[in-house]
Image (cartoon, helix red, strand yellow):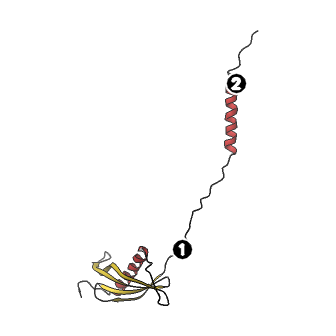
Amino acid sequence: MNTTNQSFKYPIVAMAAAVATVGALAVTYTPEPTTYTPAFTANTAPSQYELLQLRMTDNTKGQAVIRLDGFRITTTFEVEAFEDNYGVPGSEFTAVDVTSLDDVQVFDATGKRYNDFTDHIDHRNMNALIKAHIEKHRLVTLGDES
């Protein structure tokens, strides 16, 4: 009998069948997309600021009343003046930086006092509001120490 052993073809056929099966599954499988839902989403609107009153008590100190989202905030502040320009001749002006906000008091529309709930963003925006008003109306002059 002249028979040849065909046993070496069985692993090749089995491997080809496994590759074809895995390939077919890989092509047809589409995973469900996972959606990310955050634990908490704050629904906040930006705050609104309005300068109601500003009074300079001297060349470096003053008082301001600011409306913040329906609340009235009274504060005292200190400024530091310096000479600045826009980079062209004749554009010199006195610029100011608000160096401190002190004695911040918060009131509602009826005058009831609240605890100070302002944060660093509110203080930064109040500083910018005070700075812009002082520079626009030239309330501080350089070299005039009162």
Q: Quadrant of residue 144?
A: bottom left
- Left or right of 131, for residue 83: left
Corner quadrant of residue 90: bottom left
Q: State the image coordinates of residue 29 (x, y, percent, origin top left).
A: 68, 46
Residue 91 at least partly seen: no
Q: Which residue is mark 1?
A: 44
Query: Dot 1 surroundings within 10 Å: few (below 14), some, or many (20 or more)?
Result: few
Q: Which mark is residue 68?
A: none
Tell me the crowding category of disc 2: few under 14, some 14 to 19, or many 20 or more residues within 10 angstroms, Cα based: few
Residue position marked by numbered label 2 in the rendering: 10
Which image quadrant: the N terminus? top right
In-front residue for pair 82/105: 105
- Disc 2 from disc 1: Cα separation: 68 Å
Q: What element does badge 2 sit on?
A: helix
User: Of the residues shown, which amino acid type is indicated by label 2?
Assistant: Tyr
Judge whether 9 appears above or below 124 on screen.
above
Please name the amino acid that badge 1 sits on.
Thr
Say whether residue 7 is left or right of residue 104: right
